[in-house]
Amino acid sequence: MRRKALAIWLMPGVAVLAGCTPVVTRDALRRVDPTVSFAALRANPNAYLGRYLILGGVIAKVTNTSQGAEIEVVQFRLNSERRPVESLDSGGRFLATTKGFLDPQIYKAGRLISLVGQVVGEARRPFGGIEYRYPVLKISAFHIWVPVRMRYTPPYP
């Protein structure tokens, strides 16, 4: 009985601690330069080479090659939990690269992502009839936000 009471008493604390876990490692966050805005990065990616940034948004596309994977992200601002906030206001798109394979079914278009990455340059690619300049980051840590599905509980009779 005492164990059950202790478990019930500790439950709220465990829930609070679980809610405070960072979406990326503290080590990755320590490297982040908070003074660089996404607008400044988009304007001149090469001015920020080597700096680590925390960015997020919605995945537009994942491409796997023999060198690794590339995620195209539509940037959105991050809230206090570092979760992207979808809106009609985006700073543009960026590319995030990693050495491993990313399964397109898991990292699919429409999923939210937060990441810490090192600025490694820019890429110019055709997009919607124009040549688009993407800032490119090498991923050091990331988090995919999986939608929480609400479970229907019928009303108590």
Image: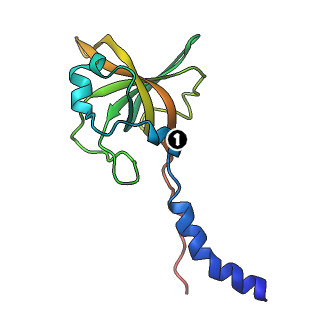
Q: Residues within 10 Å of mark 1 (few under 14, many from 20)?
A: few
- Type of colouring: rainbow
* Secondary element type, mark 1: helix
In the rendered image, residue 84, in percent from the top left (x then y), is placed at 36, 45
Residue 47, image quadrant: top left
Q: Identify the residue shown where x is 31% and y is 27%.
A: 93
Q: Identify the residue shown where x is 50% and y is 41%.
A: 144
Observer-nearest of 71 and 18: 18
Residue 110, image quadrant: top left
Residue 6, image quadrant: bottom right
Give the tally of numbered discs.
Answer: 1
Judge from the rendering whether residue 43 lies leftward or rightward of residue 24; answer left or right: left
Judge from the rendering whether residue 20 lies leftward or rightward of residue 134; answer left or right: right
User: Can the viewer see residue 88?
Assistant: yes
The quarter in which the N terminus is drawn is bottom right
In the rendered image, residue 57, in percent from the top left (x then y), is placed at 36, 38
The quarter in which the C terminus is drawn is bottom right
In the rendered image, residue 61, in percent from the top left (x then y), is placed at 43, 25
Judge from the rendering whether residue 123 lies leftward or rightward of residue 116; answer left or right: left
Above or below residue 35? Residue 11 is below
Observer-nearest of 156 and 19: 19
Above or below residue 129? Residue 17 is below
Judge from the rendering whether residue 94 lies leftward or rightward of residue 61; answer left or right: left
Q: Name the residue beneath numbered marker 1.
A: 27
Above or below residue 72? Residue 127 is above
Residue type at mark 1 is Asp
User: Can the viewer see residue 111?
Assistant: no
Above or below residue 150? Residue 40 is above
In the rendered image, residue 142, in percent from the top left (x then y), is placed at 50, 37
